[in-house]
Image (tube, grey):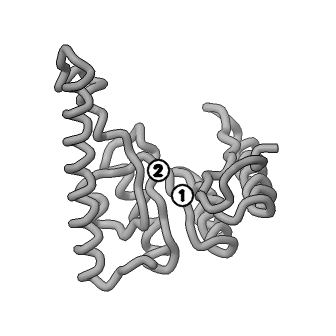
Amino acid sequence: KYAQGLDPDWTYINLDVIPKTGSTPKEIERCIEKGKENFLYIKTKLKNVLPVYHYGEKLSVLKWYMDHTDYIGISPANDTSEKVKREFLNGVFDITRDKIKCHGLGYSSFEGVLRYPFYSVDSISYKRGFYNGQNFMATTKTLVFFQIESIKKFLAHEKFVTEVWKQRGVEWK
């Protein structure tokens, strides 16, 4: 039902089963297995499904995804410090390196995307100033202008980072 009517050329993120806070290791393992089942099922309906490897999961889960797809979402516990995220990402990229495409979910640290060869990232950082009351202007037209300018800066950064990784020998197709 989930896949009906979806554009088959788009890339979709798997339906994860997230364990509740305080779950037992057995409950967490059950959630991981159900997420894998969802991924395999949705993959029979759509050609581009992104499974998600989460902070705290065993590396065997990442390796399992690498055996089943060429593109994996990486969720680095965005409610933690950059230091914690980098420790996690070091482990991820020690294994994936430039062998498989990784999408950073909610991760757009300027330093981080220069450190790790992500294929893609997403973030709402370009809106952050608006959420915190910065750049607040009286008109919608002015708000849109500042948002567009912020997006332009992110696009320029994307081109820069892509060129840096190209010079390092990592060029995604």
Q: What residue occupies the far top of the structure in this picture?
A: 138
Amino acid at pointer 2: Leu
Task: Determine whether label 1 and label 2 are within 8 Å by CB.
Answer: yes
Residue displayed at 22% across by 17% down: 139
Q: Nearer the viewer, residue 74 or 133?
A: 133
> Which residue has dot 2 on it?
105
Q: Residues within 10 Å of mark 2 (few under 14, many from 20)?
A: some
> Which residue has dot 1 on it?
73
Give the image location of residue 118, x and y in percent.
40, 66
Count of numbered labels shown in the rendering: 2
Give the image location of residue 112, x and y in percent.
29, 58
As drawn, 95 above or below 83: below
| Residue 68 as seen in the image, left or right of residue 129 | right
The quadrant of the picture occupied by the N terminus is top right
Give the image location of residue 145, x and y in percent.
21, 33
As drawn, 40 above or below 80: below
Visible in this render: residue 68? Answer: yes
| Residue 12 as seen in the image, left or right of residue 35 | left
Q: Earlier in the sequence, mark 1 or mark 2?
A: 1
Amino acid at pointer 1: Gly
Q: CA distance from mark 1 to mark 2?
A: 6 Å
Q: Residues within 10 Å of mark 1 (few under 14, many from 20)?
A: many
Which element carries disc 2, helix, strand or loop? loop
Give the image location of residue 40, x and y in percent.
77, 61
As drawn, 121 above or below 78: below
Visible in this render: residue 29? Answer: no
| Residue 20 as seen in the image, left or right of residue 139 | right
Q: Nearer the viewer, residue 35 or 95?
A: 35
